[in-house]
Image (tube, rainbow, N blue to C red):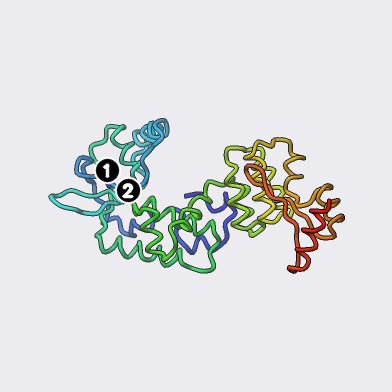
């Protein structure tokens, strides 16, 4: 999990969960730590993390050879003297690379794990958490308890799309995470910024504009322009505006407001009217011209 200071998170996160959820699983007494043979420990089949950085694992293996396992893994007993891995997949894999035969482990019962999971769910449901704090809680449930986002959504009583959108916020640049957490930008702004992850320069510019006061709708229109192939910053900003010199001139001629709504391809020209009578007047004027 990301360091609390790194993202400028408030006190809400520390109340949500410890900085390393493994610590909440370890217990306080050394008597609970066992040395288990690596061969009796099974990884969860539905382990959400499927890909591990090979160079990172190699570095961890070297550290383990030199210093040993600093923090025990967490397991739960299953059957025939075997254990299911709950937390510590990287440590387990690196220990195998390092050639270890045993590994320190804390054995937790299924009931103990269920209580921890329930406590986490209750904390994520708190109304005073920022979107980032909720996202970090969801990601812990996903990574440490091997819960799918669909399962998390059901447990939280949220739509799966809501949970997925929250979890994706952790992919934001550090500066955007800080701005969202400090409520300088909204979650709507953040989603627009996130959608430009393949355009890092434009993503930075959009964050600046949002911090500078752009509305969510303006941010969305900027994203539409960038994805439509506009790379000139001035042109992209111009497309954010609903009005141009041309729409102002047309609006003056028709005596009403005229706006442009740009889309990924093309867009709409919107002519405002306040009544059926005014609509008829506008139609007649357009036809005459």
Element class at badge 1: strand
Looking at the image, which is closer to me, 273 or 285?
Answer: 285
Looking at the image, which is closer to me, 143 or 152?
Answer: 152
Q: Position of residue 156 (x, y in %)?
A: 41, 64
Question: Residue 60's image quarter?
Answer: top left
* Above or below, 14 relative to 72: below
Q: Going 48% across and 58% down the picture, which residue do you hit? A: 162
Residue on which disc 2 sits: 72
Q: Position of residue 25 (x, y in %)?
A: 34, 57
Q: Earlier in the sequence, mark 2 or mark 1?
A: 2
Q: Position of residue 14 (x, y in %)?
A: 50, 61
Q: Going 32% across and 65% down the picture, which residue do you hit? A: 115
Q: Badge 2: few (under 14), some or many (20 or more) residues near its Cα, within 10 Å?
A: many
Say left or right for 22 vs 226: left
Say left or right for 33 vs 253: left
Mark 2 → mark 1, Cα distance in angstroms? 7 Å
* Badge number at residue 178: none
* Badge number at residue 103: 1
* Above or below, 128 relative to 219: below
- Tag 2 near tag 1, CB within 8 Å: yes
Element class at badge 2: loop
Say left or right for 174 vs 167: right
Q: Going 79% across and 51% down the picture, which residue do you hit? A: 243
Q: Position of residue 233 (x, y in %)?
A: 74, 39
């Amino acid at each position: 999990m990301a360091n609390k200071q790194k993202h400028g998170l408030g006190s809400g996160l520390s109340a949500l969960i410890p900085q390393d959820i493994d610590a909440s699983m370890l217990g306080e007494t050394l008597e609970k730590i066992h040395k288990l043979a690596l061969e009796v420990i099974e990884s969860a089949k539905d382990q959400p993390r499927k890909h591990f950085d090979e160079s990172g694992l190699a570095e961890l293996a070297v550290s383990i050879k030199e210093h040993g396992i600093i923090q025990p893994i967490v397991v739960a007993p299953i059957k025939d003297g075997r254990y299911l891995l709950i937390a510590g997949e990287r440590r387990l894999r690196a220990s195998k690379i390092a050639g270890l035969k045993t590994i320190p482990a804390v054995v937790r019962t299924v009931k103990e794990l269920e209580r921890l999971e329930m406590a986490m769910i209750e904390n994520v449901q708190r109304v005073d958490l920022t979107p980032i704090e909720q996202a970090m809680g969801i990601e812990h449930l996903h990574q440490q308890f091997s819960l799918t986002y669909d399962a998390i959504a059901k447990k939280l009583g949220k739509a799966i799309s809501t949970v997925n959108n929250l979890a994706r916020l952790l992919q934001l640049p550090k500066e955007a995470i800080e701005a969202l957490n400090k409520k300088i930008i909204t979650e709507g702004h953040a989603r627009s910024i996130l959608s430009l992850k393949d355009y890092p320069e434009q993503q930075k510019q959009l964050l600046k504009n949002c911090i500078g006061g752009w509305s969510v709708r303006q941010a969305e229109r900027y994203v539409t322009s960038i994805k439509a192939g506009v790379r000139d910053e001035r042109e992209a900003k111009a497309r954010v505006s609903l009005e141009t010199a041309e729409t102002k001139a047309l609006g003056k001629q028709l005596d009403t407001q005229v706006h442009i709504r740009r889309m990924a391809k093309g867009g709409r020209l919107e002519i405002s009217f306040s009544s059926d009578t005014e609509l008829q007047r506008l139609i007649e004027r357009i036809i005459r011209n």
